[in-house]
Image (cartoon, rainbow, N blue to C red):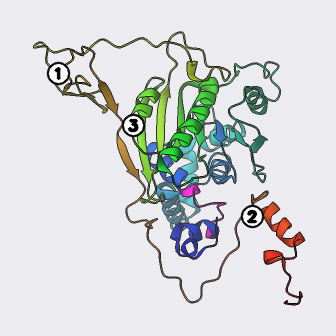
């Protein structure tokens, strides 16, 4: 997190340091979970492009420590207040109600599940350690990353060197993004390639019915990307958390219900089945032979639009229809929460807090060392005489 004037007036920037998060992006994952219940029944998670570790920190605090945030955290505080007011007798009654037939309580069952949680964070940059999180410095586009990942998930498994996990992953998340250049078309293309790398790795480790969450840049023809994701997932949603600035083109694709097409075998050496030919869907034709636009609502709530022929003005007889699938777009987060695009006045008694976790290997570190060797700013030191 930076220390510019705009960052200091950003409510989420200050709130992240007050609540102990490594970066403000932690609120994006929390708001996505509040909308889609991403962590329900999840015990094995892979965090791609994890540095500096804010999303891994969320996983650690939610899945391992059992902390609750958002509306669930508010309800937990209300329940604690009621228990404090009603007294110990009410607590004893609540414990009796939580007992199940074999004598094990739900609390003990939750604690047992916490011990089975496996979280692996992967990034090319080094990352400071987190409780219950295994960090790997690896390239998500290289085939050698899969055995390292499987070995981290199952250290005692004899088949960890193979590309088939004995216990597949429940959730794969990726908050990675390239260094933007300001050229939107180029940035969107590079981001899409990074997303494909994350997706290709997810295809190798996700279990049937698994979930995939990744950052995208919304731009021209991005609906083609959504349609391709729909091939391997039952449900594809596009979400914009309230903590994500509205002025930014970023959004997050939330995919659930993972399923591989028949006969498809994922492989990092052949990303996303490169070179294979997918079956062509049936042609969309009308009874009169003319192109027409039709709209169909799928059972899962998605809308399919058939745009008819793609070349209607040239006069050529194009028989094949141009069916395009539009992913639903959702805004996540409480409307009463802070506006990420607004800047708030700082109180007079405000005390500036240091970052929760300073960068372990910032890219500007070498530049500062070179400047110091050169004698300070512009090659001069404070004690150097002026000419």
**Residue position for label 3:** 221
Indicate which label's residue lies in the foreground, 2 or 1: 1
In space, the residues marked 3 and 2 are separated at their CA atoms by: 38 Å
Front one among 5 and 102: 5
Q: Residues within 10 Å of mark 1 (few under 14, many from 20)?
A: many
Contact check, label 3 and label 2, Cβ < 8 Å: no
Pick out the residue farthest to the front. Answer: 387
Give the position of the C terminus as an image quadrant: bottom right
Which residue is pictured at 48% across the width and 82% down the height? 345
Q: Residue 341: which quarter of the image?
A: bottom left
**Residue position for label 2:** 358
Residue 24, magenta (yes or no): yes
Q: Residue 274: which quarter of the image?
A: top right
Residue 272 falls left or right of residue 117: left
In space, the residues marked 1 and 3 are separated at their CA atoms by: 22 Å
Q: Residue 12: which quarter of the image?
A: bottom right
Q: Which mark is residue 368?
A: none
Which residue is pictured at 47% across the width and 39% down the height? 254
Stretch of the chain drawn in magenta: 18-27
**Residue position for label 1:** 291
Q: Secondary structure at mark 3?
A: loop
x and y, in percent, of residue 25 in the image: 57, 56
Q: Secondary structure at mark 2?
A: loop
């Amino acid at each position: 997190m930076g220390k510019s004037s705009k960052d200091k007036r950003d409510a989420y920037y200050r709130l992240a340091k007050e609540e102990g998060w490594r970066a403000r992006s932690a609120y994006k994952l929390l708001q996505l979970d509040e909308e889609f219940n991403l962590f329900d029944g999840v015990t094995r998670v892979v965090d791609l492009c994890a540095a500096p570790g804010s999303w891994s920190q969320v996983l650690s605090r939610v899945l391992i420590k059992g902390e609750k945030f958002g509306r669930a955290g508010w309800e937990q505080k209300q329940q604690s207040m009621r228990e404090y007011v009603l007294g110990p007798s009410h607590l004893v009654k609540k414990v009796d109600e939580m007992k199940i037939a074999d004598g094990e309580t739900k609390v003990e069952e939750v604690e047992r599940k916490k011990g089975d949680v496996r979280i692996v964070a992967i990034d090319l940059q080094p990352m400071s350690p987190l409780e219950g999180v295994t960090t790997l410095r690896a390239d998500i586009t290289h085939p050698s990353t899969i055995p390292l990942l499987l070995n981290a998930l199952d250290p005692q498994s004899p088949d960890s060197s193979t590309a088939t996990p004995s216990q597949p992953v429940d959730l794969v998340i990726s908050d990675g993004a390239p260094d933007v250049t300001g050229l939107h078309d180029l940035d969107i293309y590079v981001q899409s390639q990074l997303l494909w790398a994350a997706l290709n790795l997810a295809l190798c480790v996700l279990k049937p019915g698994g979930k995939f969450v990744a950052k995208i840049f919304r731009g021209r023809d991005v609906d083609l990307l959504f349609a391709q994701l729909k091939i391997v997932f039952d449900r594809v949603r596009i979400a914009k958390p309230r903590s994500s600035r509205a002025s930014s083109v970023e959004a997050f694709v939330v995919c659930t219900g993972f399923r591989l097409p028949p006969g498809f075998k994922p492989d990092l050496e052949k990303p996303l089945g490169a070179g294979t030919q997918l079956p062509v869907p049936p042609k969309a034709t009308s009874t009169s032979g003319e192109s027409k636009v039709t709209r169909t609502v799928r059972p899962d709530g998605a809308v399919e639009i058939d745009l008819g022929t793609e070349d209607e003005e040239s006069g050529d007889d194009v028989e094949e229809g141009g069916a395009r699938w539009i992913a639903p777009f959702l805004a996540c987060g409480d409307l009463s929460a802070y506006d990420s695009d607004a800047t708030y006045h700082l109180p007079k008694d405000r005390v500036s807090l240091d970052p929760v976790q300073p960068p372990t290997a910032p890219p500007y570190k070498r530049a500062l060392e070179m400047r110091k060797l050169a004698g300070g700013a512009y090659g001069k030191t404070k004690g150097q005489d002026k000419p």
